[in-house]
Image (tube, rainbow, N blue to C red):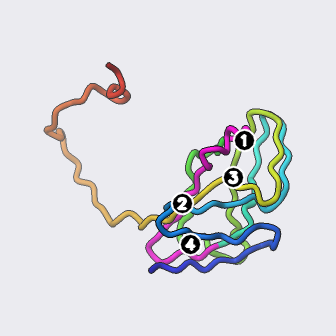
Amino acid sequence: MPQIRIKYFTDAIERLTYIDGKSDWIDLRASEEVTLKAGEFCLIPLGVAMELPEGYEAHVVPRSSTFKNYGIIQTNSCGIIDGTYCGDDDMWRMPVYAVRDTVIHVNDRICQFRIFENQPKITFDEVESLGNKNRGGFGSTGKQ
């Protein structure tokens, strides 16, 4: 079983828990109170640094209720934390943009993460044609 070493920057947030069989995602919490006005950007501190197992990366995304509850969107859609981001000062953060005035309190669950194995080594073979049937162009599959 992969093991993650974790450093907490504060005792004000609940410790991370993984509930086997309930979810593949683990909630992350704001470690400082953040007040944002509509149109402002912020890197919300999550109060943890981690050393991921070799060959893994973490994907950080908002919880399904984050926009409804706080009016924030993650600016990079999905945060990728690679295995080299594991120093004592490498606190995880969530980059957000506020669409309305909001306050995020310490210990509020605002995002979640899971770990994935790194992409395997690949090579590219340049060709003149792929030889496959066209599907109608990008964005065409949702039309009826």
Q: Pointer 3: what residue? A: 110
Q: Name the residue under label 1.
A: 69
Secondary structure of the residue carrying numbered label 3? strand
Give the magenta part as a residue range: 50-72
Q: The N terminus is located in which quarter?
A: bottom left
Question: 81 or 27, which is in the foreground?
Answer: 27
Q: What element carries label 4?
A: loop
Q: How crowded is mark 2: few (under 14 residues within 10 Å), some or many (20 or more)?
A: some
Quarter of the image where one finds residue 129: top left
Q: Position of residue 130 (x, y in %)?
A: 18, 41
Q: Name the residue under label 2.
A: 25
Callout 2 touching callout 1 (CB < 8 Å): no
Q: How crowded is mark 3: few (under 14 residues within 10 Å), some or many (20 or more)?
A: many
Q: Residue 75 magenta-drawn?
A: no
**Image quadrant occupied by the C terminus:** top left
Q: Earlier in the sequence, mark 1 or mark 3?
A: 1
Q: Left or right: where does residue 118 sit relative to residue 104?
A: left
Query: Rounded to the nearest whole Å, what is the CA distance between mark 3 and mark 4?
Result: 24 Å
Query: Residue at image x 27%, y 25%?
Result: 136
Question: In the structure shown, which secondary structural element does the residue marked by tag 1 occupy?
Answer: helix
